[in-house]
Image (cartoon, grey):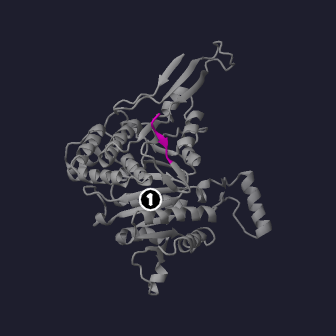
Amino acid sequence: MIIHSSGFEGLAGLKPVAEAVSLGGMAGQDFGVKLNKGSPIYLSMIKYNPPEDGEPIKVEGGVWQTPNKPIVLFIEGDGIGPEITRAAMSVIDKAVERAYKSSRQIKWMEAIVGEKAEKMAGNRFPQESVDLIQRYRVVLKGPLETPVGGGFRSLNVTIRLILDAYANIRPVKYMKGLESPLRNPEKVDLIIVRENTDDLYRGIEWRWDSPEAVKLRDFLRRELKVEIEDDAGIGVKPISKYKTQRVARMAIRYALQNGRRSVTIMHKGNIMKYTEGAFREWAYEVAVKEFRDKVVTEEEVSKGASQAGRLLINDRIADNMFQQIITRTESYDVILAPNLDGDYISDAAGALIGNIGVLGGANVGDTGGMFEAVHGTAPKYAGKNVANPTGIIRGGELMLRFMGWTEAANLIDKAINEAVNQRKVTQDLARFMNVQALGTKEFAQALTQIMDTL
């Protein structure tokens, strides 16, 4: 019998909150289970012990109710994940302490997922961890690897489904010192809100020579008089009114709560009239029906209405949107997009600041959220203390904003900008600045020290 426990090295005051008891052996030993000879056996149960003095965050209808000592889950992740996640937690804790003294404190609790779970329990996502995420609903997540090959579903997608996290929110803001391709990168200050559950990403498609494709082509010809070539693969692009309007509501609410200037609806409705065109119409409908006294449309302004004190709602064709964020960057603020367009524009916006690795993001819904960096696991840098933790720290900053702990979030933002200004950076930025690079831990320590001066 092997007993594994999840320790919390490097973060003062944290105690193990989970342990896994695994019975490990080889088939042929008498465990009462018949398997092929040489197959590993895992009979595992992970037991979680929540912090006694913490309380869950309640998220109902998109409204967050955060206690003074909220229980927040964290997933270390794979590759560089454990290093950057621990670094981010130390920075978040410092910001909370600095902003609120001892009156508020995050009670961290590890959810064991990914490679660590596989080693402990023989399963990358044990049911106990699924249940834990369903219970507590708020997660700071390090990057997770999806192994190449069949049989492994993306853990990131699975967690989004558990939380019904229908909106992907990615702030993109230039930091002085980054090597941007733009002449005036300081104008980049965007929030991309991407619908997360609909559109082509639902994966409803068939290979050109599959029986399903043959049946569908035949149906379209016979019933709808639509001709599709026999060598064409077929995909379906569903855009739902319900899903569109809930993400539009989220984007507008976020813009209002965070003092943003405008929400631009990105779409290709001139071509895809009944999918992306409908996305545009349904988003406008939410704006004018549910937020009438707080918003004004661009069309209304063109007819003489005043924008003073109100959120501007407008729209742009998708291909023009890409041009606009380069040539008229300062004219855009929050961009609301369907799933596919949102995927494209969020990475394009990230390229404008010169380093997508410093970006954080959130996947949120009406009952919870997952906060993370937007980059991957970078396994070749794992354990080397060289990875830049800024992305997941930014994810934590975004989490604090949803929690309503704005003062702590602002401290993190100021500390990151000041660190870059002081040229205290990790190796990915140090090489452009011609300065000595800080390690992952040392960069986090620099941020906490800077907070003491703010």
The residue indicated by pointer 1 is 346
- Tell whether position 55 is magenta: yes
- Determine whether, in the image, residue 183 is placed left or right of residue 326: left
> Residue 221, how many percent across, how many down?
77, 66
Q: Residue at x 23, y 42 (%)?
A: 437
Q: Which residues are magenta?
A: 52-57
> Residue 372, how many percent across, how many down?
44, 47
- Determine whether, in the image, residue 7 is placed left or right of residue 59: left
Main secondary structure type of the part rendered in magenta: loop
On screen, residue 390 above or below 184? above
- Determine whether, in the image, residue 255 is placed left or right of residue 365: left
Q: Which amino acid type is shown beneath numbered disc 1?
A: Ser
Task: Say if residue 173 shows up in the picture.
Answer: yes
On screen, residue 33 above or below 179? above
231 or 399, which lies in front? 399
Instruction: Look at the numbered disc 1 and give the secondary structure of its residue.
Output: helix
